[in-house]
Image (cartoon, helix red, strand yellow):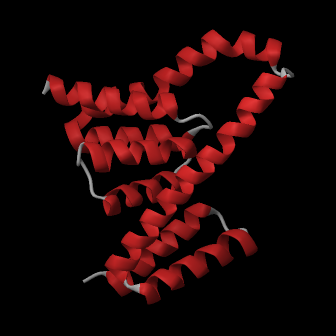
Amino acid sequence: MLTLYWQLFVSHLTANLLGYGGGPATIPLLQHEVVDRHGWMTNGEFSEIVALGNGLPGPIATKMSAYIGYDVAGIPGAIIATFASVAPSLIMMLALLGILMKYKESPQVKRLTKVVRPTIAVLLGVMTYDFFFDSFTAAGWIHTVILIVAGYILLEVRKVSPTYVVIGALLYGAIFLGG
């Protein structure tokens, strides 16, 4: 059991340590650890956790870590994974806040930000492709297109809260895809 706790800790610590840019940047890294590396969940299960995490208030990475930790190793797993998800931010924030404020106008810091943002965009794009392909495979192209178009219209055009869009997608799935 200690090995499992250690794997949970290292996986969440690594994903959150390397996820420069906050929770959304951590998701593809966490997906790699949870789905690809350890096989604790399927890609479909992971995408459901992302949807649930987006619908609840608060930082997404800690909610996802708590759920994954609980699912894999109960309450101790949830505590370990959640701590591992906030530890890098806590340690780095305390250690580097003064330095960052001192050099925030530095050309090197500005260049770093310009280099990192496209990398995060590519990681999110790959994850989106994986989720689309899994949805297409599991639900078919008609349901996938309906959900994508409806989600886009509701989120971007109508400015509906993501919580309601996720609830609507869950209801759609229960009605049309449950079986």
Q: Would residue 25 be found to the left or right of residue 116 on screen?
A: left
Q: Nearer the viewer, residue 86 or 118?
A: 118
Kindly indicate the quadrant of the structure image that contains residue 120: top right
- What residue is shown at x 31% (from left), y 34% (from top)? 78
In the image, residue 7 above or below residue 145: above
Kindly indicate the quadrant of the structure image that contains residue 29: top left
Residue reaching furthest to the left = 1
Q: Nearer the viewer, residue 29 or 56?
A: 29
| Residue 79 seen from this side | no
In the image, residue 39 above or below residue 69: below
Q: Which image quadrant: the N terminus?
A: top left
Q: Nearer the viewer, residue 78 or 7?
A: 7
x, y percent for residue 96: 66, 13
- What residue is shown at x 82% (from left), y 21% (from top)? 104
x, y percent for residue 9: 32, 27
Kindly indicate the quadrant of the structure image that contains residue 21: top right
Q: Would residue 4 be found to the left or right of residue 42 on screen?
A: left
Q: Would residue 46 be found to the left or right of residue 147 on screen?
A: left
- What residue is shown at x 84% (from left), y 20% (from top)? 106
Callout count: 0
x, y percent for residue 12: 38, 33
| Residue 66 seen from this side | yes
- What residue is shown at x 30% (from left), y 49% (from top)? 36
Residue reaching furthest to the right = 105
Q: Which image quadrant: the C terminus?
A: bottom left
x, y percent for residue 115: 69, 38
